[in-house]
Amino acid sequence: MIDSDVFVQGLQDLGVNFFTGVPDSILGGIIEELLTRKAYTPAVREDEAVAMAAGAYMAGKVPAVLMQNSGLGTSLNTLISLNMIYRQPCLLLISWRGFQGADAPEHLVMGETMLPLLDTMKIPYRILSEQTMADDFRWMGQTFMKQRVPLAIVIKKGIVKGLHP
Amino acid sequence: MQSRAQAMAALLELLTDQPVIVCNGFPSREAQKIADRPTHFYMIGSMGNAAAIGLGVALAKPAKQVVVFDGDGNVLMGMGTLATVGALKPKNFIHVVFDNEVYGSTGNQPTISNVVPLEKVAKAAGYVHVERVFDRDDLVYEFKDLLKQDGPSMLLVKVNEFVEDAGRVVLEPPAMTARFMKAIE
């Protein structure tokens, strides 16, 4: 399992310096670590977080937005009609609720459709794992700078240490 | 009652190089026609997100006064952002809402801002200064005052439904991003 502080340090080493989002239990450890580092600006909705990140990007920051995959649905229009058409990159850290159908009912449809949805929206993504982490970080940096679009790191339960390991 | 374009022209006369985020629909077209500046960011989509974009700029550039030109429909759609602004309290954030009580870009369907006073919502959420103005003299007086004070502030301007004959936003979106980024560096 990846430690939250290792993961956050990796992002900061990459240059990410504006973190916002809406919590999920899977992301709890990461957000706790960001709060400890006074590096997290809480948003009330995921589309707001994405728009705030876009503003920060235009003001010189490298932004990341944390969200549960339900928030992908909430932020769809902002990602499409702001980030994509204006070429404003953003790192999306999306927790994969509903993975393999093992979750509460409200997560099951998005759990199954998230990856096809990302494909359809042409949002490049990688599924984080401890074994591929170094490579995942390299990919994040390169894709952010080269493609100038939102990109996603999908985080399954148990990959990054949560609040209650 | 003045038109949004008249009110906007009066405000733009008082602004110089402040970053201005203009919400989607006719407000962006009108701002482009009245005084196009590289420090303006014209939205063409992502309705409801103007204040959030402005907040991101304000947080990242605390030394710059950031102005958002918003509409009543936009504010209602992204009303949670009033809470985020009110909680974070960026001193350099001025939120101007041109309130014509209709969705002007889609055929003047009514919003609900005739019965929901948005500046009072902002005040309750934690904005430091809020004002509601009707005529040009009050508008100019209050805006000058807000420019001198620490925010976050909201200036709600009641305007009529008149829409200026203004063409679509000319710059392609990626060029708009690049121009704005360079201008506020």
Image (cartoon, coloured by chain):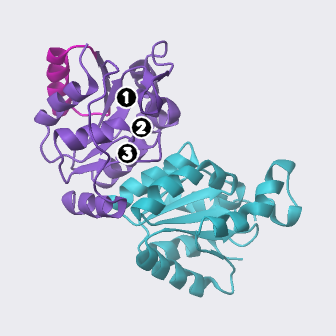
Q: Is residue B134 visible?
A: yes
For the residues labelled 3 and 1, the Cα–Cα distance comes to 13 Å
Residue kind at label 1, given as amino acid type: Tyr
Between disc 3 and disc 1, whose residue precedes? 3
Q: Residue at x 38, y 50 (%)?
A: B56
Q: Residue at x 55, y 50 (%)?
A: A77
Q: Position of residue B128 (x, y in %)?
A: 33, 27
Q: Position of residue A55 (x, y in %)?
A: 37, 54
Marks 3 and 2 in Cβ contact (< 8 Å):
yes
Residue kind at label 2, given as amino acid type: Val
Mark 1 belongs to chain: B
Nearest the eye: B150 or B64:
B64
Mark 2 belongs to chain: B
Q: Residues within 10 Å of mark 1 (few under 14, many from 20)?
A: many
For the residues labelled 3 and 2, the Cα–Cα distance comes to 7 Å
Chain A drawn colour: cyan
For the residues labelled 1 and 2, the Cα–Cα distance comes to 7 Å
Give SS at disc 2.
helix
Residue kind at label 3, given as amino acid type: Leu
Q: From the viewer's perspective, is A130 left or right of A64?
A: right
Chain B drawn colour: purple
Marks 1 and 2 in Cβ contact (< 8 Å):
yes
Dots 1 and 2 on the same chain: yes
Nearest the eye: B17 or B31:
B31
As drawn, B71 above or below A101: above
What span is in magenta?
A: B133-152
Q: Which residue is mark 2?
A: B85
As drawn, A82 above or below A125: above
Give SS at disc 1.
loop
Between disc 3 and disc 2, whose residue precedes? 3
Q: Which residue is mark 3?
A: B55
